[in-house]
Image (spheres, grey):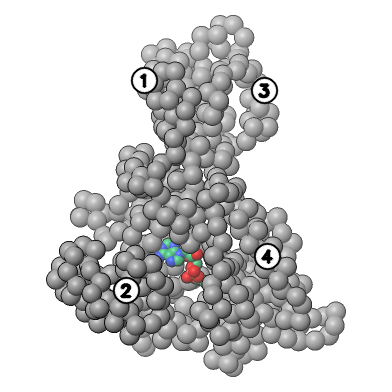
C-alpha cells in the first residue's frame, strides 16, 4: 500500500473533490454563483458541526475557567466606533489599469517581491508604480493604492445611520461583559467563548474557503489580572491551539508559529502570534493569539460611560482585566482537516481515495449495508441495525452496487466503519462483518455486542 499526499499544486484536486462528494461547493451556481461564496453540503455540514462541537467541548465544557455566549450579528454601531473598526478596519486596494484586475496591494507586492508593506499606502503605490508588473497581464500600469473598508453596511428599521454586519465575533463579548459579570460568578482568570458568523468585504476572496467574505469564527476572550505574569498563560494558549489542530488531523510538521514583529504591533498589544498551516498553496494563518491589554474594555467603558470591571472578592479590589485573545476561523479549520485527511492509495484491487479524518470529526461514523439489495430478509435486518445505531451515531444506509464499490464510497467521505449484513447473519450466528477504513481489515461481531463495540471504538 503506498500513500500520496496532495502536492502543493493540488488545491484544484481538493476543490473538485469537495464539490463531487457534497462537502463544499460554489453557492447559487444556477444563477452564475456569487463571488467566491460557498455552501456546505450534506457531508460538509456534518464535518463543520463536528469540529464546532469538538472545539466547544475542549475549550468550554472541559474547562472550569470558561463560559460561553452567543451574541447577534447586528450590533449597535457605537461598538464598532469604540473598537476602531469603523475608521480603521481597512485593506489596501489597487487596480491594474491595463487589464482591470483588482488586487489587495500588500498581497500582490508580497507575491512579487516577498516584502511585507502592509499599512504603508504611499510606499506601496511607489513600489508598484516603480515597474512592478501585473501578474495577470504583465503591464505596469497601476492606480494609486487606496484604502477600502472591510465593513459590510446595512440598514435597520427605526435606526438612524448604518448598521454593520459584525467583522468579528469578539465585539459582543466586550459589549456584553457587564451583563455576564452581573449574572454569573467567575473567578479570574476566566474566558468567554463564542462561535458565529463574521463578515468582511475582502478585496479579493481566494484560495477556496481560506479567504471568504462570510465566514465563521471561534473566539475566546481570556481575562486576566494585569498584575500577574501573563507569559505562561500565553504560551499555554498557543500550545492548546496547536493541540486542537492536531486533534482535527493536522500533522505537526505542517504547523508553524509566526510572531508579529514588535514594530508592527498595535500600541496596546504586548504580543501577537499566528499559528500557520501548510495549505497546498503555502503557509497561511489558521489561529491568532493576541495579548490586547485593557484596550477593549477601556475603550468600551469610555464610549459607553459604563464601568467594565472585575471585582476580586478575595482581595477586595476592583480592576479592569487584561485580555488574551485566542481566535480561529472555522472554515480554515475545515480546510485544514480536509487537506490533512485527503489520501490517494494504491490497494490490491486498484486505487482508492480515502479521507483519513480522525473518527471524532468524520461526517458519517458507520455505514450499514445489506449484502444484496434484492433479498428482503437481508434488507430488513440491515434496516433494523441502522435504526438501532442511528440513535447514537450519524449513520448511512447503502444498498447500491457491489460491496467493494460501497466501501470505496465510504472511504471517500471518511467513514471509519462499515457494517455488512450477509447470509451468515441470518442463518448461522447473528454476527455482522465490520470493516475498518484505515486497515481495511474485517472482523465478525455479534449483533448484541454492536453497542459496546462502537462505544469502545468511537
Ligand atoms: N478578533 C480577532 C480577529 O478577528 P483576525 O486575525 O482578523 O482576528 C481571526 O481573525 C481568524 O479568523 C483568523 O485567524 C482566520 O482564521 C479567520 N479569518 C479571518 N479572515 C477570514 C476570511 N476572510 N475568511 C476566512 N477566515 C478568516
Q: Nearer the viewer, residue 24 or 131?
A: 131
Q: Which residue is mark 4?
A: 235
Horizontal and vertical percent for residue 206?
Answer: 33, 60
- View extreme (top): residue: 428
Helix, strand or loop at mark 1: loop
Beta carbon of the mark 3 residue lies under 8 A of ligand 1: no
- Comparing labels 1 and 2, the label whose residue is closer to the camera: 2
Whichever of labels 4 and 1 marks the residue nearer the N terminus, that label is: 4
* Residue located at (41% from left, 72% from top): 116
Whichever of labels 1 and 2 marks the residue nearer the N terminus, that label is: 2
Whichever of labels 4 and 2 marks the residue nearer the N terminus, that label is: 2
Helix, strand or loop at mark 4: helix
- Comparing labels 4 and 3, the label whose residue is closer to the camera: 4
Whichever of labels 3 and 1 marks the residue nearer the N terminus, that label is: 1
Q: Which mark is residue 105?
A: 2
Beta carbon of the mark 4 residue lies under 8 A of ligand 1: no
Q: Is residue 54 above or below residue 273?
A: above
Report if residue 202 is visible in the image.
Answer: no
Q: Which mark is residue 401?
A: 1
Report if residue 6 is visible in the image.
Answer: yes
Crowding at mark 4 (Cα within 10 Å: few <14, some 14-19, many 20+): few
Q: Which mark is residue 183?
A: none
Horizontal and vertical percent for residue 67?
Answer: 66, 65
Horizontal and vertical percent for residue 117?
Answer: 39, 76
Q: Which residue is mark 3?
A: 449
Left or right of residue 448: residue 158: left
Helix, strand or loop at mark 2: helix
Amino acid at each position: 500500500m503506498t500513500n500520496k499526499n496532495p502536492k502543493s499544486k493540488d488545491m484544484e484536486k481538493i476543490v473538485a473533490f469537495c464539490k463531487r462528494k457534497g462537502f463544499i461547493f460554489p453557492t447559487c451556481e444556477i444563477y452564475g454563483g456569487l463571488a467566491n461564496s460557498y455552501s456546505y453540503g450534506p457531508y460538509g455540514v456534518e464535518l463543520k458541526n463536528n469540529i464546532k462541537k469538538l472545539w466547544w467541548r475542549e475549550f468550554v465544557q472541559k474547562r472550569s475557567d470558561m463560559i460561553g455566549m452567543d451574541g447577534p450579528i447586528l450590533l449597535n454601531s457605537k461598538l464598532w466606533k469604540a473598537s476602531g473598526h469603523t475608521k480603521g478596519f481597512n485593506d489596501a486596494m489597487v487596480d491594474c489599469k491595463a487589464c482591470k484586475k483588482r488586487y489587495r496591494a500588500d498581497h500582490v507586492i508580497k507575491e512579487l517581491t516577498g516584502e511585507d508593506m502592509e499599512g504603508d499606502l504611499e510606499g506601496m503605490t511607489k513600489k508598484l508604480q516603480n515597474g512592478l508588473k501585473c501578474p495577470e497581464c504583465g503591464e505596469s500600469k497601476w492606480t494609486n493604492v487606496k484604502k477600502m473598508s472591510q465593513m459590510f453596511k446595512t440598514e435597520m428599521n427605526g435606526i438612524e445611520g448604518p448598521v454593520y454586519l459584525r467583522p468579528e465575533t469578539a465585539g459582543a463579548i466586550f459589549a456584553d461583559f457587564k451583563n455576564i459579570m452581573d449574572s454569573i460568578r467567575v473567578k479570574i482568570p476566566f474566558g468567554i467563548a463564542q462561535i458565529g458568523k463574521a463578515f468582511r468585504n475582502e478585496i479579493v476572496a481566494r484560495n477556496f474557503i481560506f479567504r471568504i467574505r462570510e465566514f465563521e469564527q471561534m473566539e475566546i476572550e481570556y481575562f486576566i489580572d494585569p498584575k500577574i505574569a501573563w507569559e505562561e498563560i500565553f504560551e499555554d494558549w498557543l500550545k492548546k491551539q496547536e493541540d486542537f489542530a492536531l486533534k482535527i488531523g493536522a500533522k505537526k510538521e505542517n504547523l508553524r508559529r509566526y510572531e508579529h514583529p514588535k514594530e508592527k504591533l498595535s500600541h496596546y498589544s504586548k504580543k501577537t502570534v499566528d499559528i500557520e498551516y501548510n495549505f497546498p498553496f503555502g503557509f497561511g494563518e489558521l489561529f491568532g493569539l493576541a495579548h490586547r491589554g485593557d484596550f477593549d474594555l477601556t475603550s468600551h467603558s469610555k464610549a459607553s460611560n459604563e464601568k467594565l470591571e472585575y471585582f476580586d472578592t478575595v482581595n477586595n479590589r476592583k480592576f479592569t482585566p487584561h485580555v488574551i485573545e485566542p481566535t480561529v476561523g472555522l472554515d480554515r479549520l475545515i480546510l485544514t482537516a480536509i487537506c490533512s485527511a485527503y489520501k490517494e492509495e494504491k490497494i490490491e484491487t486498484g486505487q482508492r481515495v480515502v479521507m483519513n479524518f480522525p473518527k471524532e470529526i468524520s461526517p458519517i461514523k458507520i455505514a450499514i449495508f445489506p449484502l444484496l439489495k434484492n433479498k428482503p430478509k437481508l434488507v430488513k435486518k440491515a434496516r433494523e441495525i441502522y435504526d438501532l445505531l442511528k440513535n447514537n451515531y450519524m449513520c448511512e444506509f447503502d444498498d447500491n452496487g457491489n460491496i467493494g464499490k460501497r466501501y470505496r464510497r465510504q472511504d471517500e467521505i471518511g467513514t471509519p466503519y462499515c457494517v455488512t449484513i450477509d447470509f451468515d447473519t441470518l442463518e448461522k450466528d447473528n454476527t455482522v462483518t465490520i470493516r475498518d477504513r484505515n486497515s481495511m481489515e474485517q472482523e465478525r461481531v455479534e449483533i448484541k455486542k454492536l453497542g459496546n463495540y462502537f462505544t469502545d471504538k468511537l
